[in-house]
Image (cartoon, rainbow, N blue to C red):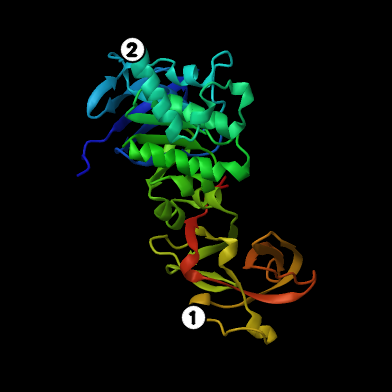
């Protein structure tokens, strides 16, 4: 049975530079074997949070715990080398003058035989056993990444901090190496805290996502919940393209060219933004004699004129200029659908796939 004590817990971490809070009151918990992803744009405080946990940077306030034991606050501090925390970075940081075996053994304690046994075990696990005598410059990027993983695992860390470690790999290799790495870490029951700015990577890898913005965690939860119950318009836009329809609430309803939308809890007179992803825009082929009738969930059709259409590989992206206000709406359609520019079509939007947010100045 899995322990209920978090392998890693940070409480109210704050770090300031020149009075500006780069990390502002950040708290999270990571259980053994769990992958938690700090996701957010560049400069939001993700990497600074990792550096504080690793011990290479001190927080201005807050506490860090490992297995329920305090390892750092603003007075007490366990040195980085005694925290049992592994690190993996984008640049691999292999020593060019050491061969693979010595790179993996670097920092290991024990006698020569114990070190050699651990090194060979790990290199076999990551598929690099035959490269034990090779040097980093003789390896591909993917092979260097495997060696970096073996070196990070060698001291048997209870926590692994990963700062965009796969971004230097080409797309052909990235998915396979990423999945293999996480499988090995989970087998070791390691708690994993991963930093990325790529939503798709976070969705693929994480058991839990902590969405960061301006130094704070603004939303935290399972990938499915973060994606389908976003906290605000910026959270929706971080994961995908968005369409925005604006309106004003009257009697808990917002009137739009696509019909009325519920806006529960929003006061009368409040301007709102109805946000919908392109894949949830439905083209009403029935009005052109080629498709099903709209369902009640689809609402009222509104007419748009095709501006451009592009095939994206697995889907087509079609942009429409709407008759009612001249705004542009984007729709994605599975497979190939390339109507000519200037063609008029009727669009509907899935009410159950829309998000209604109060209109805030400066929303992204």
Camera-side residue of 94 and 259 = 94
Can residue 247 be seen at all in this image of the molecule?
Answer: yes
Mark 2 residue element: loop
Distance between the Cα atoms at labels 2 and 1? 73 Å
Position above or below: 321 against 120: below
Q: Position of residue 50 (x, y in %)?
A: 43, 27
In the picture, residue 30 is in which quadrant? Answer: top left
Q: Give 251 or 173, whichever is nearer the viewer.
A: 173
Q: Nearer the viewer, residue 239 or 122?
A: 122
Q: Residue at x 59, y 22 (%)?
A: 136
Left or right: 306 in relation to 212: right
x, y percent for residue 9: 30, 32
Q: Mark 2 or mark 1, which has the lower sequence index?
A: 2
Q: Position of residue 138 (x, y in %)?
A: 63, 24
Q: Is residue 266 above or below residue 107?
A: below
**Of the residues tagged 2 and 1, which is closer to the observer?**
2
Considering only vertical position in the picture, is 270 above or below 197? below
Residue at x 60%, y 54% (from the top left corner)? 241
Compare residues 290 and 43 and report the one nearer the observer. Answer: 290
Q: Which residue is mark 2?
A: 111
Categorize mark 2 by other alpha carbons within 10 Å: few (<14), some (14-19), many (20+).
Answer: few
Q: Which residue is mark 1?
A: 296
Left or right of 170 on screen, residue 145 = left
Residue sitting at x 44%, y 15%: 106
Disc sitting over residue 167 in the figure: none
Q: In the rendering, at what x and y percent does residue 258 appear?
A: 57, 73
SS assignment at label 1: helix
CB-based contact (under 8 Å), mark 2 and mark 1: no
């Amino acid at each position: 049975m899995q322990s209920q004590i978090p392998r890693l817990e940070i409480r109210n971490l704050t770090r300031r530079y020149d009075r500006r809070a780069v990390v502002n009151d950040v708290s999270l918990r990571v259980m053994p074997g769990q992958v938690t992803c700090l996701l957010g744009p560049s400069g939001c405080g993700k990497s600074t949070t990792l550096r504080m946990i690793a011990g290479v940077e001190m927080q201005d306030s807050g506490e860090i715990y490992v297995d329920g034991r305090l390892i750092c606050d603003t007075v007490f501090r366990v040195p980085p080398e005694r925290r049992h925390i592994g690190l993996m970075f984008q640049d691999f940081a292999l020593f060019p003058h050491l061969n693979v075996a010595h790179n993996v053994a670097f920092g290991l304690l024990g006698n020569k035989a114990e070190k050699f046994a651990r090194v060979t075990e790990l290199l076999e696990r990551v598929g690099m056993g035959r490269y034990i005598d090779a040097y980093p410059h003789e390896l591909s990027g993917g092979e260097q990444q495997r060696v970096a993983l073996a070196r990070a695992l060698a001291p048997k860390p209870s926590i692994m901090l990963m700062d965009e470690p796969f971004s230097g790999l080409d797309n052909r290799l990235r998915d396979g190496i990423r999945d293999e790495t996480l499988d090995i870490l989970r087998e070791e029951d390691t708690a994993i805290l991963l930093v990325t700015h790529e939503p798709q990577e976070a969705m693929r890898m994480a058991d839990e996502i902590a969405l960061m913005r301006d130094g704070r965690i603004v939303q935290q939860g399972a990938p499915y919940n973060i994606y389908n119950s976003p906290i605000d318009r910026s959270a929706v836009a971080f994961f995908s393209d968005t369409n925005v329809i604006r309106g004003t609430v009257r009697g808990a309803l917002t009137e739009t060219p696509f019909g009325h939308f519920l806006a529960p809890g929003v006061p009368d007179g409040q301007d709102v933004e109805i946000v919908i992803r392109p894949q949830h825009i439905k083209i009403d082929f029935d009005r052109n004699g080629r498709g099903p009738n709209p369902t009640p969930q689809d609402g009222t059709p509104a007419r748009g004129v095709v501006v451009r259409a592009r095939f994206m590989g697995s889907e087509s992206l079609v942009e429409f200029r709407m008759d009612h206000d001249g705004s542009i709406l984007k729709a994605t359609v599975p497979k190939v659908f390339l109507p000519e520019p200037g063609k008029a079509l009727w669009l509907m939007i899935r009410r159950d796939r829309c998000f209604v947010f109060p209109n805030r100045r400066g929303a992204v």
